[in-house]
Image (cartoon, rainbow, N blue to C red):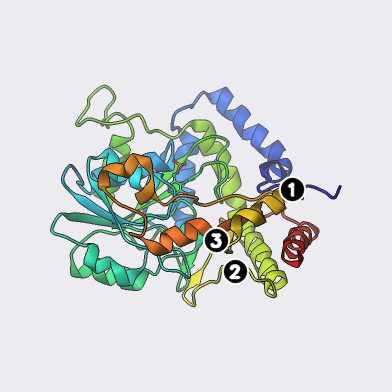
Amino acid sequence: MPEKIPYLDLAAQLRPLRKELDAVIARTLDNCSFCLGPDVAQFEKDFAKFVGVEHCSGFNSGTSALHVAMLLLGVGPGDEVVTTPFTFVATSWAISYVGAKPVFVDVDDATFNLDPKLLERAITPRTKAVMPVHLYGHPFDLDPILAICKKHKLPLVEDTAQAHGAKYKGKTVGTFGEISCFSFYPGKNLGACGEGGALVTNNAAYDKRARSLREHGSTVRYYHDEVGYNYRMEGIQGAVLGVKLKHLAKWTTERRRVAHRYHELLADTPLQLPREAAWGESAYHLYVVRHPRRDDLKKHLETNGVGCALHYPLPLHLQKCYANLGHKAGDFPFAEKAARECLSLPIFPELTDTQIQRVVEVIKDFFRK
Ligand SMILES: *Cc1c(COP(=O)(O)O)cnc(C)c1O
C-alpha cells in the first residue's frame, strides 16, 4: 500500500518549530500572562505590520472578531448585512448574533466569491454593511465592491479568515475594508495551538472600542462602560502566533508552489481547476477542484489513502439554522453548484512533490476507469 497522503499535516509544520514553541510556552508558564499580556501585545504589533494596517487586536477566535466588527458598525436588530451564502457559517453568525439579517448574494462561478455584478440589487435602506469573504485564500474583486459601498455609503468588512497575506492588485487583503477579521484556528494559514482571531483596522476609535468589547466592556478593571464579552486572546496563543508569524510569508510561497504544481499536473484532466483572477494573488488556504462526479471522486481518493474535504457541502441559505429566512433550492444557483461539485485536495506548505504526484496519480486513475 503506497504512503497515505493526509488532507492536512499540522504535525509536519510543528516539528521544526517545536523547540522554539516549547520555549515560548514555558516562558508564558513562568510569567503567568495567560490572558492577553506582553506576547499578545507584541503579536498584535507584528501582525498589524504584516497586514499593513494601523491597529490589530487579538481575539479568542475569528468568530468573536467578526461579532465585534458588527457591534463596532452599530449593526443591530432590523438591519441587514450583505454577504455570501458560500462560506463557513461563522461569517453569517456575526450578523445573526447582533440580531440582524444576512442578505445573501450569489457567488461568481470562477472564484467562488461574492459576485460584484449582483451586489447592488441586494442593497436596501436597511443595509448597514457589506461583508464578503476571500474564500479559499483568493481575494474577492475589491474595486467594484468598494465602488458600490462608496456610492451607498456602506462600510466594507473583509472576512479574511482564509486569506492571510493574499493580495489584490499587489496590496495585501485586510487593508481595504473599514474592518477586517482574521482567524487563527489551527488549520488556517496562520494557526494557533488552539483558538485565536484578530480584528484589524485603520480607525483608532474602532480599535479602542474593540479592545474594550473583548474585555467585558471595560478599559479600567471592574468599570464597565457597556455590555462586553470575554473574547480575549490567550497569552500562550499570542506567544505561539509570534513564533509562527515569522514563517508565514515562506509558507504562503510554499502553498503557491503546491498549487502551481497541481495546475501543471492536472491540466489534462477533466477537473475544473482553481484559477487566479488577473488582479488576485491567492494565499491558497485551500486548493479546490470541481467536477460533477465529485462524490465518486472523493470516495476513490479516500479508498486510495488520499485525504480530501468538502468546503462546503451545503450553502448557508439552505442550512436548517436559516430556515427562517425562507430561502429555497435554486435561489443562489452558483453557490449550490459549487457546493455539489467542489472538492478540496491536500494542500499545506510541507506537501512534497512526491506526495503531489501521488495525489495526481490517484485522480488520473479515477478518470481512466
Ligand atoms: C475559520 C473561519 C471563520 C471563523 O474563525 P474561527 O477562528 O474558527 O472562529 C470565519 N470565516 C471564515 C470564512 C472562516 O473560514
Residue at image mark 3: 283
**Which residue is found at the position 21% from the left and 61% from the top?**
154
Give the answer, above or below, for where 121 lies relative to 188: below
Q: Which mark is residue 273?
A: 2
Side of 39 relative to 107 (left or right):
right
306 relative to 271, above or below: above
Residue 68 in view: no
Q: Is residue 29 something that shows in the picture? A: yes
Q: Which residue was labeled with disc 1?
A: 303
Question: Along the polypeptide, which appears first: circle 3 or circle 1?
Answer: 3
Tell me residue 228's x, y (percent). Answer: 27, 31
Amino acid type for the residue under numbered disc 3 = Ala
Q: CA distance from mark 3 to mark 1?
A: 29 Å
Q: Nearer the viewer, residue 1 or 47?
A: 1
Q: Residue furthest bottom?
A: 278
Disc 2 secondary structure class: loop
- Count residues near mark 2 (Cα–Cα under 10 Å), then give few for <14, some for 14-19, many for 20+: some
Task: Give the position of the C terminus as an image quadrant.
Answer: bottom right
Q: Nearer the viewer, mark 2 or mark 3?
A: 2
Is residue 175 or residue 316 the one in the foreground? Answer: 316
Asked whether the beta carbons under mark 2 and mark 1 sit within 8 Å of each other, the answer is: no
Q: Amino acid at mark 2?
A: Leu
Q: Residue furthest left?
A: 125
Tell me the residue at 81%/59% (across/down).
354
Tag count: 3
Quarter, ligand 1: top left
**Label 3: element kind:** loop
Badge 1 element: helix
Among numbered discs 2 and 1, the one appearing first in the sequence: 2
